[in-house]
Image (cartoon, rainbow, N blue to C red):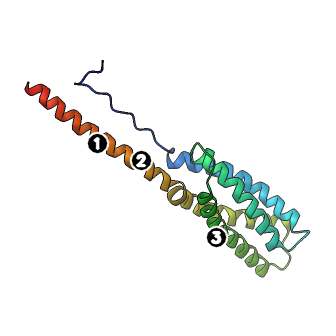
Amino acid sequence: MESLLAPQLPAATPATSGPISSFIRFTVFGGGVGLLSSGAVALLAGLMPWAVANAVITVASTVLCTELHARLTFKKGRSAGWREHWQSGGSAIAAYLTTCVAMFALHLLQSSPGVLTEQIVYLGASALAGTGRFLFLRLLVFGADRKRAQAPTQRVTLLQMQETSGLATLLAAA
């Protein structure tokens, strides 16, 4: 039989981990895929225009990263849904435009930059866009579920606390 005077309230379990550990995982997974993507863009650019190669690789890497981020970075415990894929895709468009603008600016400044210079500019632009994507994904895409999931738990906990304190007051008065 449970004690009425000292009820056990359910422990709150965080839906995701803290921002620093999430950012580290985001950097590892996103950065790893970004490095692979950088090489893939360079290889595909020999077969098609650079912007098209960048678009193809951006789509493929976004799908892969969204799954990694849902399962591992933001610890959703499940695969990303269609909503998360579409929202992540929207943020990938901004990343795509950032890398395209950076490469366009590089070619305006240097008519024939070397592969190493192109890779440095591409990866730098990707890192800048990635930081923006982390904030977007954490706060709006995967964070929205966390806020919805926590709200009912907090209401139940407050209700339980009110019932418990009322019962304790009645028992103390008796």
- Residue 135 shown left or right of residue 36 in the figure: left
At which x and y percent is residue 125? 68, 67
Q: CA distance from mark 2 to mark 1?
A: 12 Å
> SS class of the residue under badge 1?
helix
Q: Amino acid under label 1? A: Leu
Name the quarter where the C terminus is drawn. Answer: top left
Residue, far front? 1
Q: Amino acid under label 3? A: Ala
Residue, far left? 173
Name the quarter where the N terminus is drawn. Answer: top left
For image coordinates 54% across by 54% down, the residue present is: 142
Q: What is the quadrant of residue 38 in the picture?
A: bottom right
**Residue nearest the viewer, comparing 159 with 119:** 159
For image coordinates 51% across by 49% down, the residue present is: 19
At which x and y percent is residue 168? 17, 29
**From what the image shows, is residue 63 above or below residue 100?**
above
- Residue 150 shown left or right of residue 31 in the figure: left
Q: Amino acid under label 2? A: Gln
To which residue does mark 1 refer? 158
Q: Dot 1: within a 10 Å radius of its alpha carbon, few (fewer than 14), some, or many (20 or more) residues? A: few
To which residue does mark 3 refer? 94
| Mark 1 or 3, nearer chain start | 3
Q: CA distance from mark 3 to mark 2?
A: 30 Å
For image coordinates 82% across by 68% down, the residue present is: 53
To which residue does mark 2 refer? 150
Q: CA distance from mark 1 to mark 3?
A: 42 Å
| Mark 3 or 2, nearer chain start | 3
